[in-house]
Amino acid sequence: MWGTTQIKQNWANSLTSQTHLDRLEAESIHIMREVAAEAENPVMLYSVGKDSAVMLHLAMKAFYPSIPPFPLMHVDTTWKFREMIEFRDRKAAEIGMDLIVHTNQEGIDDGVGPFTHGSAVHTDVMKTQALKQALDKYKFDVAFGGARRDEEKSRAKERVFSFRTAEHRWDPKNQRPELWNLYNARIHKGESIRCFPISNWTELDIWQYIRREQIEIVPLYYAAKRPVVEWEGSQIMLDDDRVPPELAKTAVEKYVRFRTLGCYPLTGAVESTADTLEDIIQEMLLTTSSERQGRTIDRDQAASMEKKKQEGYF
Amino acid sequence: MSHIDSLIAEDITAYLEAHENKSLLRFITCGSVDDGKSTLIGRLLYDSKMIFEDQLDALERDSKKQGTQGENIDFALLVDGLAAEREQGITIDVAYRFFSTDKRKFIVADTPGHEQYTRNMATGASTADLAILLIDARKGVLTQTRRHSFIASSLGIRKLVLAINKMDLVDYDEAVFKKIERDFLEFAEELSAGIEIQAIPMSALEGSNITGASDKTPWYNGPSLMEYLETVPVDDARISAPFRMPVQWVNRPNLDFRGFSGQIASGTIKPGDRVKTLPSAKETTIERVVVHGGDLDEAVAGQSVTLTFADEVDTSRGDVICIASDPAEVADQFQARVLWMADKDMLPGRRYLLKIGAKTVTATVLDLKFGIDVNTIQDKPAKTLGLNDFGVITLGLDQPIAFDPYDINRETGGFILIDRMTNNTVGLGLIDFALRRAGNIHWQALDVDREALAKQKEQKPAVLWFTGLSGSGKSTIANALQQKLFGLGKHTFVLDGDNVRHGLNRDLGFTDVDRVENIRRVSNVAKLMSDAGLITLVSFISPFRSERRMARNMMVDGEFVEVFVDTPLEVAEQRDVKGLYKRARAGEIKNFTGLDSPYEAPEDPEIQINTVEMTAEEAADQILNWMRERGWFEA
């Protein structure tokens, strides 16, 4: 039995066959190189999460030995976990890529935040509007995003090169056909493209790749003892002193981790003791609810993500 | 999610090692909603335990609200993503689904079945290894089955699964199954050679023969759908084909390193291999196969790598690196099969951008030889190709490209056509063969008539005849309009006193006879220019109605546009930009129009411009709008 497995392994590693991760990696690299060659002013949207970590790693591989020929951009709502910001700054410096951080100043001036304005307004002003502002300001014609088709039903139909009007709108009825690996990146002035190089990856692929390539991710993904409070049906972490005092008073220390990372008041923690990659993957494979459920934004109404995307949410 | 796999709980590391080495199968499902296609995919996801509990809850809720299965789960709702589609109950676009079993990982392109979505199906088929053709057991092989088989096989899919569904509605009758299988095999002889066909009787609704053998079909000994998908060999023909790699990006981090990055389209490559870069046909030797983390001893089709050469060989994006002993062909004229994907028809003579590999060139459709009826696979005469039409065309490129026939190499023989104005992808093409080798410059017979010349410029010719008093603003407006037309990519020329009277007409004076001759000559030049496909702006006082009528009659119907630049004499005289009125009043100029020579204002001009009330810019916009409303820019 052992012998058979051994032979199979060798065969799989021989020239005749690439594993599914090899195929996904090669496809993503191909997509990134197309953008680098055809776009005038591309940017990689870097959200600091695990998908972004994989995307960044792929970019390093795609252009090696060159440094990826585009900057990273983070839309900072000012409500991200502090560990994310530290991680972001350190990573960009390590790789030597330019990092652009954009925050919606109008939103700051108006005091917009999740506790005061709710998740919908906060996300719209500090994320969707902020992203549009940043793309307009720097006149990026192609922006890489880390969205995957397996995340959500409307994303299953989005193209790898997803066209946006000058008003940043997505028209799901009017998408360009994508044939073979021939991507059409031609646009008129003012229009832009969101490019999703990891469209065909699943959540499990991401984790396996992180494990195989030993990609560093923000420690928040690993379980640790953290102060959490119950807010709007989710367990959120007490990341700074902006949590309303009466709520902060209820904080308890628990072993938790995060399956996705975003604004800390909008990102529900899950109780877990998984503190290695293997444990996380095991937990994910045995768990019973899908990844995005931790995010408040999807639950609003049916087809909500599709609507948000038409309006410009990444 | 639970792959029911105790290994996950017991030994996650062992599970991960095993899963990491799974192969990948990409397949497409073709059929219409009525055949139960979405139901089948939903069932595959459900049975392979790829549905999370929260999704299942949502599914049960949605099934009651929108479903078509009463109280039962409507699996179709799981896969029909876009809101509009859910409301209409049809799958419009290509949706990609992911699932895995213990043996394989799968990417499914779920594509619509109706004829109006042929292009969506082709899109899904372009990256698939295998196609599942759904057939309603009650209906048998239909026109759409034939259409789907034709498109799938044209795009190079060599494995077809005939999923004979809804067997529950024909009491799992073997005779029904056998007849459909026979009908299909008979038809399949018309498809390209070398296609493997597996027919499976099933019921997606009841789950029969989906993941395991069904006791409802004891007469069927073949594999269940899942068994087949898990075990069908994905023999990668690309690896045994000769080496090809289109250069995507020239990698130059510093002066010491110059590499060529790309994804290997076919074959294998290792240091020391002799290669040829096309179309330049220069030979060199591979020095290194570079990837992050160390050089490779050998790389194969599908891998994204960076190659370095032993010699300085000028190579840039779009070139194709080939094994020197068996290089690709190079040509600038082809015969190709094309599937049209745009609302606006494909017309012979029109120019598009063609993207193949990493190269984009300009292509002219030389000839549409015939259309192919996708339902009967028969040739049919055709003058144009509309949305979802399939046809055989010849193409001429502005420069030679490297390629292989599509049937030999799917990676280097497929191209897309892009509309130069809208930037949309309007067609897909499969190269059949080169019409001749590049180098002998000799174009295919194509009647270069005035229509062809205009089409080449993608415009409708026009003679915009500006008439009005001296100093009325004719030339100013004509120049403003020319700038705008130029900005729209239109080909124009302005004929005015400055460039005609100083050359062609310098022997003419300002007597009535000379004025008539002047206009006759200008009209003829304008006519020739419109034959050449240009939009000609004639800016002449042209005071007499009869001469303007002569000019009009000389032009092709509808191409003469009289623009009356209506400026009252007092205003023109007041402006007197060139000081001519002053000199005429002083008696220095004789026969001056408006003073001692008459100006006959047009009675029924196509466009009348009131220069007292608008600027030259606004006047130009008025003319532009007039042209746009009459479809001048849709040619």
Image: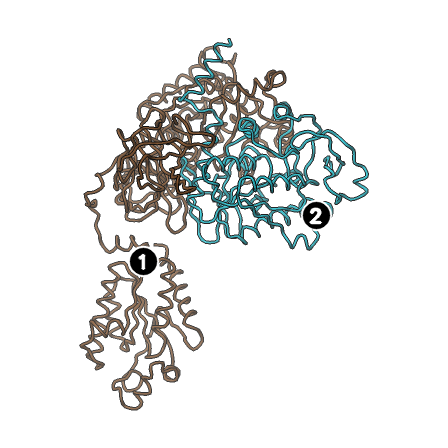
The image quadrant where one finds the N terminus of chain B is top right
Q: CA distance from mark 1 to mark 2?
A: 57 Å
Name the side, left or right, on which B244 lies relative to A19: left
Residue B523 is situated, as x and y percent measured from the top left of the image, at 23, 69
Residue A155 picture location, percent across and down: 54, 37
Report the front residue among A92 and A136. A92
Outermost residue to the bottom = B586
Residue, disc 2 = A113
Above or below residue B47? Residue A98 is below
Q: Which residue is mark 1?
A: B460
Foreground of the two, B27 or A228: A228
Q: Residue furthest front?
A: B256
Asked which secondary structure carries label 2, the reply is loop
- Amino acid, disc 1: Lys
Other-residue count near label 1 (Cα within 10 Å), few / some / many at <14 / 14–19 / ≥20:
many
Where is residue B614? Give x, y as percent: 44, 73
Identity of the residue drawn at 59% across and 16% down:
B7
- Report the chain shown in cyan: A
